Structures are given as C-alpha cells and as structure tokens.
Amino acid sequence: MNKLNEAKIFGGIGAILVLIGAFIPAIGFVLSIVGLVLVFIAVKYISDETKDNSVFNNFLIHFICTIIAIIAVVAIILGTIGVIGGFSFFTELENEEITDFESFWDYFEPFIWGIVVALVVGWILLVIGAVYLRKSYNSIADHTHVSLFRTTGTLYFIGSITLIVLIGAIILFIGKILEIASFFSLPDNLPTKEASSTIEK
C-alpha cells in the first residue's frame, strides 16, 4: 500500500472522528484529538508523495494557529475571572441584587468584555489558520485532481470568517463533511503528467 492509499484511509477516518467527536460527550474530545492526528498523518503522507513540502507546512501553520486560538481563549477567560475576583465572583451572585439591565451590566461588564476579547482573538487566529489550510488543500487538489479539496478549503475559509456571526458554524460543518469525502476520493496513485496535460486542455 503506497502513501496515497494510506492517506485516503487515515484522512477519511480521521476527519470522521473529528466530526463525530464534537457531538459525543465525555470521550468526544479524545476522539477529535485522535482524528486530528490521523488527518495530520494523512496530509504528511500526501506531502511526501507529491514531494511538495508546502502541503504539510501550510497545514502545520493552520494547526498551530488553531491550538494557539484555543489556548488564548481559555487563558484570557481565566485571566478575566482572576482579575474580577476569581470563581468567588460567581458564588457571590446569590448576595447581589440584579433587578435590571443596569445592575446586571455593572456586575458583569468586566467579565463580558473579557469574553468578547477572548472570542475576537480566537476568531482572528482561526481565520489566519483557515488561510493556510486553504493553501494546503488547494495544493492537494492541484496534485491529485480531487477538486473537493479546493471546495473544502474555501468553505473552511468562509466558515471561519463568518463564525463570528454564527452562520459560520454551519458552513464549517458542511466543510467537514466535504473533507471526509475529499480524503476518500483520493486516487490510488498520483495522476501522470500526461493526464494532467489532458485535463488542462
């Protein structure tokens, strides 16, 4: 079995695990991590097979941006909680008289702004990561002639940009489904130069 065949299996199964992991409580996070590792391996195999290092390098930047986004969001939120008095901030709610929006805003304003900053920082990093994922998948599409990769990359990019208005979540979900189809559509061998020339004509 060549690396392209292995990439088809690892990538397809990995993308499935990442997708279903988001909907399974408790073990879902573990499934998503395992799936992401499998997709990583698949992209590396494609990069090796095509002898195009940019395929994996761009995917790696996407992965790093995603990890940093998650860490940044958690760190900013925890930092905000620490600044406003720690988790006792929430336990003291019972003693607060919040009867209208003004009193609600006075009490929660620092926490709300912390969440807003966290989400904006995370969103910016996800968009940057999506740019590099799109580059990686576009390169895969060029080498393998599986145009679904190009569509997947575009959906990830659009979904990341529009995630701030929530509709992006639906677009990313569709992109994830197409990612599964993309990996399972990989050919057993790379198209020959003659085939590439024919397609271009």
Image: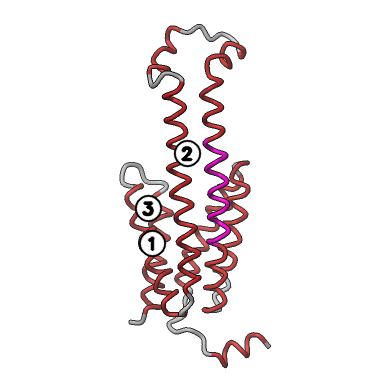
**Few, some or many residues within 10 Å of mark 3 (<14, 14–19, 20+):** many
Q: Mark 1 to mark 3: distance in Å?
A: 8 Å
Q: Which mark is residue 145?
A: none
Q: Earlier in the sequence, mark 1 or mark 3?
A: 1
Q: Which residue sits at x=48%, y=84%?
A: 190
Q: Which residue sits at x=43%, y=36%?
A: 75
Disc tally is 3
Q: Which residue sits at x=55%, y=53%?
A: 172
Q: Secondary structure at mark 2?
A: helix
Q: Earlier in the sequence, mark 1 or mark 2?
A: 1
Image-quadrant location for residue 13: bottom left
Q: Secondary structure at mark 1?
A: helix
**Few, some or many residues within 10 Å of mark 1 (<14, 14–19, 20+):** many
What residue range appears in magenta? Answer: 118-133
Between 177 and 135, the one lying in front of the other is 135
Tag 2: amino acid: Val
Residue that protrudes farthest toward the bottom in the picture? 194
From the top left corner, tell me how far across and down residue 182 is, in percent: 50, 69
Q: Are marks 2 and 3 in contact (CB under 8 Å)?
A: no
From the top left corner, tell me how far across and down residue 87 is, in percent: 38, 21
**Residue pointed to by mark 1:** 14
Image-quadrant location for residue 56: bottom left
**Residue pointed to by mark 3:** 32
Q: Main secondary structure of the magenta part?
A: helix
Tag 1: amino acid: Gly
